[in-house]
């Protein structure tokens, strides 16, 4: 079964809109059959039912498999998080819209609102989203927004299917045409972790009083979290452009864009310096920097989203057009393996759904490649 949701748009905001039209159609489909090796077809998919992964099953040697499509026809989806009822909140970078997508078939899409203060340019716009860990009480949604003046964290109250007026939480994060960070993640301690890029000005990363090129840790009200190492918002520093965060227990992991040579997967420690721009990749421990646990050639990765599922870390790669799986052994990241190479194009965000599967977004309408029929989409992956 196919459901169509037509939503009015301002002409020119969305790649692929006609010159004289202002309407974009989201194609919301039942869960189709898909394989890990075949590119998506423009033909209507065949519905199927796939059981959720068994948490007790060993997946060490089992390849991941695309078992469904949540939605097609999205426009550069960037942030994704789940509400307590299993529905997802999704942001679109350039359209500035916040969407709610049903967690169960037929995955109905509803527009919750538009963040008008967002000023999309280059890699900036409406970026990450995080649902409050106390959502049942406060109904708060947190968003990372690039405005005309800064990058900032805002929050808004969700009532029914309408998002209220955004309230600033943390302002004054430097912004630019590129390297704006943008990922939000609540930790097990209830504090909000915020990634920022160095906006193409590398020296900012080594200035602990500058919010650019950092991972920040703040309270839900935007204050520096108690116990932060420098008595400000900074949790770790020396980053170039972190766009992926995932917790495994109390350990925070981060995926980071390199420059010309190495992308990185880092285990984050409070107060640690990860070396940019003095070091790219490994080789900085004798200078007081923390080395990444895994590195990639930038052509093979450019990692954005990061998730943990099935005993592995999963990295969504943009330039590399693949999903990376990394094993964890005694707290060490090892044995990176690539899947779906080139099958679905650029991959932006990967998040573990409440049923243990992964929701994986493509980013083929972000201005960096030629969109395919049906782009952008959210795939369901059995880890």
Image (cartoon, grey):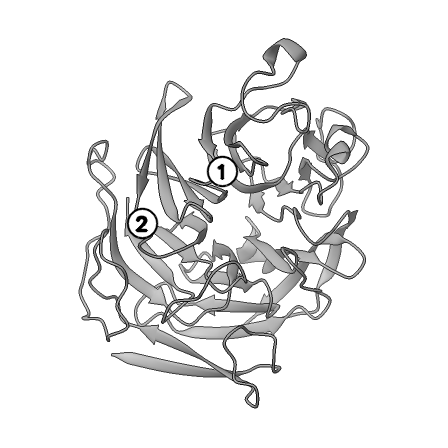
- Vertical placement of residue 198 versus 366, above or below: above
Task: Name the N-terminal-most of marks 2 and 1.
Answer: 1
Residue 161 seen in the current view = no
Image-based side of 291 in relation to 194, left or right: left
**Quarter of the view holding residue 268:** top right
Task: Identify the secondary structure beneath mark 1.
Answer: loop
Residue drawn at (62%, 55%) of the image: 123
Instruction: Give the percent coordinates (x, y) of residue 184.
Output: 59, 47
Q: Which mark is residue 357?
A: 2
The x, y position of residue 98, in whole percent, is: 56, 67
Q: Is residue 1 above or below residue 139?
A: below
Residue marked by disc 1 = 298
- Quarter of the image containing the N terminus? bottom left
What secondary structure is found at the residue carrying circle 2?
loop
The quarter of the picture where residue 208 lies is top right
Q: Position of residue 37 (x, y in %)?
A: 22, 52
**Mark 2 and 1 residues: CB-CB less than 8 Å, in contact?**
no
Q: What is the x, y in percent for residue 367? A: 54, 62
- Where, quadrant-wise, is the C terminus in this rendering? top left
**Label 1 Cα neighbours within 10 Å, binned few <14 / some 14-19 / many ≥20:** many
Q: Nearer the viewer, mark 2 or mark 1?
A: 1
Residue at figure coordinates x 23%, y 31% from the top left? 60
Up-down relation of residue 136 to residue 201 (above or below): below
């Amino acid at each position: 079964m196919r459901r169509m949701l037509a939503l009015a748009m301002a002409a020119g905001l969305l790649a692929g809109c006609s010159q004289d039209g202002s309407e974009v159609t989201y194609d919301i489909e039942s869960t189709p059959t898909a394989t890990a090796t075949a590119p998506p077809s423009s033909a209507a998919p065949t519905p199927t039912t796939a059981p959720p992964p068994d948490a007790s099953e060993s997946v060490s040697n089992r390849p991941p498999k695309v078992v469904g499509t949540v939605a097609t026809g999205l426009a550069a989806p960037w942030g994704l998080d789940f509400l307590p009822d299993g529905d997802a909140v999704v942001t679109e970078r350039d359209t500035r819209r916040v969407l709610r997508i049903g967690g169960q078939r037929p995955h109905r899409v509803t527009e919750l609102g538009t963040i008008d203060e967002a000023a999309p340019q280059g890699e900036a716009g409406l970026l990450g989203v995080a649902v409050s860990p106390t959502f049942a009480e406060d109904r708060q949604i947190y968003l990372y927004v690039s405005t005309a003046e800064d990058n900032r964290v805002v929050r808004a109250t969700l009532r029914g299917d309408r998002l209220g007026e955004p309230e600033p939480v943390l302002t004054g994060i430097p912004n630019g045409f590129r390297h704006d960070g943008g990922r939000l993640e609540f930790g097990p301690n209830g504090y909000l972790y915020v990634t920022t890029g160095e906006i193409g000005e590398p020296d900012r990363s080594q200035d602990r009083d500058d919010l650019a090129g950092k991972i920040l840790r703040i309270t839900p009200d935007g204050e520096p979290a108690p116990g932060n190492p420098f008595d400000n918002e900074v949790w770790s520093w020396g980053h170039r452009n972190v766009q992926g965060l995932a917790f495994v227990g109390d350990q925070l992991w981060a995926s980071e864009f390199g420059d010309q040579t190495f992308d990185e997967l880092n285990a984050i420690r409070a107060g640690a310096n990860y070396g940019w721009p003095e070091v790219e990749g490994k080789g900085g421990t004798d200078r007081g920097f923390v080395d990444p646990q895994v590195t990639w050639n930038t052509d093979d990765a450019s990692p954005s989203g990061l998730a943990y599922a099935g005993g592995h870390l999963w990295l969504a790669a943009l330039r590399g057009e693949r999903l990376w799986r990394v094993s964890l052994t005694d707290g060490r990241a090892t044995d990176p393996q690539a899947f779906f190479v080139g099958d679905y194009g650029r991959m932006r965000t990967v998040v573990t759904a409440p049923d243990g599967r992964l929701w994986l977004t493509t980013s083929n309408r972000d201005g960096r490649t030629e969109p395919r029929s049906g782009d952008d989409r959210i795939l369901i992956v059995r880890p």
